[in-house]
Amino acid sequence: MEITEIIKEAFIFPSQNLEKLAIYIVLTFVLALLAVFGVITALLGINDGSFYFVLTFIFLILGIIVALIITGYQVGVLKSGIDHDESAPSLELKNDFITGLKMLAVSIVYFIIPAIVGWIMVFITNIPGQIMDIVQKTAVSHANATAMAGSSSTVVTGVSDAAIASLTGSITVSALVTLVVFIIFAFLQAMGESRLANTGELGEAINIPEAFRDITRIGVGKVLAVILLIVIIILVIQAVLGYLYGQIPYLSILGIIVTPYLAFFSQRAIGLLYSEIA
């Protein structure tokens, strides 16, 4: 399929499966309620003891279960794209929960490497050492200022502009490198999720070299174009809605529908993209 065909078909897909979309919306609404109740009971538990903390724990567990079911169902929507099935999948609580657990494992595998790279960059650029140096010089400067209070002598700060600039540069370099690696692995994870949807096998999903080869098989340019278009479309829609919410707060209720719709759209588009090599 051409890129425009993938985007067009994926965007229309949720409107052709309103019943399944409605079920998905209900699930996301339940998850939101569990999160709200969890926060409320946690706050009440600060003053009124362990009973509310027990409720918070229950809401937390239920929230995790519902979140995993939602995640598993999203993989099913992706699978419908791979198979070019015109209908969204039916909700299967047990299977979707298991798939959600697998997808959680996939996410951990694909994003633990960027996290490790981030930590390595922090120490390569010696950010902790630079921070400690600035803290020590600031402490010394403060002590000198206190000792010289009331004196006519001039207090010179112990932290130079060069030290601040060096720390800023180190943080910037570390953040940029980590961001680049994070983005690369986000694209790889999209292939890993597609492999999970296509095979149902966790081992296939976390096979990072094969996920990379999948990108080359589809075409790096096409993968980049489709995923970037998905991101841009979602950001534009959310930005427009954010502006409307600011003007008319009551319209924020639309988020209950729009967010699930966009989730269907993005999963379907990635599935259609992957279908070329499935």
Image (cartoon, grey):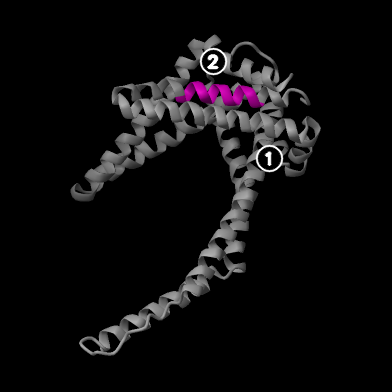
In the picture, which quadrant includes the N terminus? top right
* Left or right placement of residue 28 versus residue 218 in this view: left
Q: Main secondary structure of the magenta part?
A: helix
Whether residue 103 is situated above or below residue 113 in the rendered picture: above
Amino acid type of disc 1?
A: Leu
Q: Residue at x 51, y 33 (%)?
A: 68
In this picture, which residue range is highlighted in magenta? Answer: 259-270
**What x and y, as percent, mark residue 136?**
42, 79
Q: Residue at x 57, y 22 (%)?
A: 265
* Left or right placement of residue 221 versus residue 162 in this view: right
* Pointer 1 residue: 188
Of the numbered discs 1 and 2, the one sitting upstream in the chain is 2
> Quarter-wise, where is residue 154 in the image?
bottom left
Whether residue 98 is situated above or below residue 183 in the rendered picture: above
Q: Secondary structure at mark 2?
A: helix
Whether residue 210 is situated above or below residue 263 in the rendered picture: below
Q: Residue 14 bears which disc, if any?
A: 2
**What x and y, as percent, mark residue 62?**
40, 34
Can you see residue 69?
no
Binning the other alpha carbons within 10 Å of mark 1 as few (below 14), some (14 to 19) or many (20 upward) gives: many
> Quarter-wise, where is residue 139 in the image?
bottom left
> Quarter-wise, where is residue 269 in the image?
top right
Q: Residue at x 72, y 26 (%)?
A: 274
Whether residue 221 is situated above or below residue 170 in the rendered picture: above
| Number of numbered discs | 2
Binning the other alpha carbons within 10 Å of mark 2 as few (below 14), some (14 to 19) or many (20 upward) gives: many
